[in-house]
Amino acid sequence: MHNMRTLARWMVLASLLIAGPPAFARSTDGSDGSTTEGRGASQVTTSTRHQRQSALEQFDELEEAMRVARKRSDWRSYLIEAGQLKQFLNAAPDSLLELARAEVHVDNQQAALDELATYVRMGQSSAAIENLREFASLRQAPAFKSIRASLPENRRPLAQSSSAFYLAAPRLLPEDIDYDAPGKRFFITSILGDKIVSTTGDRHLVEFAQSPDHWPMVALKIDSSRHLLWATEVAMQGFAAVDPSDQGRSVILCYDLQTGKLLRRIEGPRPSDLGDMALTREGDVIVSDGDGGGIYRLPFNGKHLKRIDNGDFMSPQTVAVAADGVHVYVPDYVRGIGVLDTTTKRVRWLSTQGRFALSGADGLYLAGNRLIVVQNGISPQRIAIFTLDASGTGIVTERIVERSTRSLGTPTHGVVAGSDFYYIANSGWDALDESGQLKPGTTMPDPTVRRVSLQPSI
């Protein structure tokens, strides 16, 4: 989920992480988030100097060390910290740019060029590469020619999807979407409307439920077999429309799918931002706290949330439950995609392999051996499909569904329905400021739901 509060936190790093859109989701509490760069398909969380620190604490420590080194022009120390940042962020694209900048300051031009080459190989594009003063010497190198050529190519509009239906409500700000196959209805949460609406795929929207507390309605999942609809309402931090005394509260809601009657209301930990959700086969609810970093499980008939991670995540988004019911794919907006063992709390991070951009994922969905990701936190924003290997912990291929198009705008979440994937495009998040107010001189776009075929059948 987009988290306006996180925007402010990431801007603190504007002088360090120099490329890509700022993250909309924040960070964490917990323990043990250090990683070891592996040569295989994934990286395993290990204990090093950060054994007892949460991911947020590790990140803050690295940020401060880099800031001090830069202020002192201690470029050797800066290089060491930038390398550790890359390792901690599991080689996320922005970390490569930061390491390239550090390499420039110690006159290691080839190493800097190698980092930039990896960045563009991941399909990324940043104006900083062409404009940053510190990269001036690199732009004169013969090897920079191919890097420069890749930048516009990575921004080239691409669309393998088509419009499924329009949402005739510009002020809706749609966030999450799910599909009730028996009822042949899509359900969509509204951030600005504080409600859930349904549609059969035409332009007509039917109100299903209003937020009990008049907060933004955020996550949504349908349990068709049990005739239930689960959702969350979040009193988003910094949102002007939310009473300051409520900000930081999250609630899980359970509705009767047929009547819209509210059956259960479970308050989450405070503060928390339970903005993303998944369901297990047993009907358990798994929610992510994009602001606090935790992953929580609510047993089907339970009354209390139980934390099932160990603090490795900074900003977890929409998780996907593996077929074994034990492992959960967790897209961390900052660190990439981790595979969480819910019995041991151990995390294996999918490797970028120097060619896959895995951070910035708001929505993640499992379809057979494929991970479908909605990435609104990288540059350019995109919808991508990654094919996994037999172990489920390594990526084999990548397919870009859509990027850099006017129809995409800022995408948010999606749903697999039959052999198609539907996703929300042009949500309108990019038209809002940090307080959730419309930016001066802008208008809300017309949101759409787009569709791409997943054939061959999954």
Image (cartoon, helix red, strand yellow):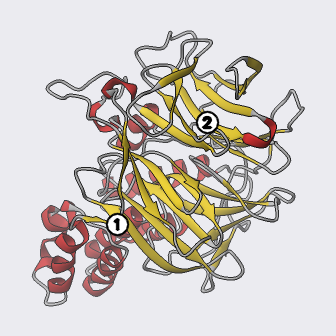
* Res. 220 mark: 2
Q: Which residue is at a point 48% across and 70% down the rendered structure image?
A: 91
Q: Amino acid at mark 2?
A: Leu
Residue at left offset 17%, top offset 70%: 152
Relative vertical location of residue 82 with respect to residue 108 in this rendering, above or below:
above
Q: Position of residue 297 (x, y in %)?
A: 79, 41
Where residue 317 appears, as percent x and y from the top left, is: 57, 47
Q: Of callouts 1 and 2, which one flags the residue occurring earlier in the amino acid sequence?
A: 1
Asked if residue 33 is positioned above or below residue 3 in the image, the reply reads below
Report the side of 109 relative to 458 (left or right): left
Against 425, is 458 above or below? Answer: below
Residue sitting farthest toward the right: 301
Q: Nearer the viewer, residue 90 or 274?
A: 274
- Classify mark 1: helix, strand or loop: loop
Total labels: the figure holds: 2
Q: Quadrant of residue 255?
A: top right
CB under 8 Å between callouts 1 and 2? no
Amino acid under disc 1: Gln
The picture places residue 363, in percent across and down from the top left corner, at 53, 51
Residue at x 46%, y 71% (from the top left corner): 83
Secondary structure, mark 2, is strand
Q: Residue 89 location, x and y as percent?
A: 52, 62
Around disc 2, counting alpha carbons within 10 Å, would you say few (fewer than 14), some (14 to 19), or many (20 or more)?
many
Q: In the orientation shown, which residue stands out farthest toward the bottom?
A: 142
Residue 160: assigned label: 1
Task: Say whether residue 256 is left or right of residue 432.
Answer: right
* Residue 369 falls in image quadrant: bottom right
User: Relative to residue 104, is residue 170 depicted above or below?
Assistant: above
Q: Nearer the viewer, mark 1 or mark 2?
A: 1
Badge 1 crowding class, 10 Å Cα cut-off, few under 14, some 14 to 19, many 20 or more, is few
> Is 324 on the left or on the right of 47, as rendered?
right
Query: Which of the labelled discs sits on residue 422, or is there none?
Result: none
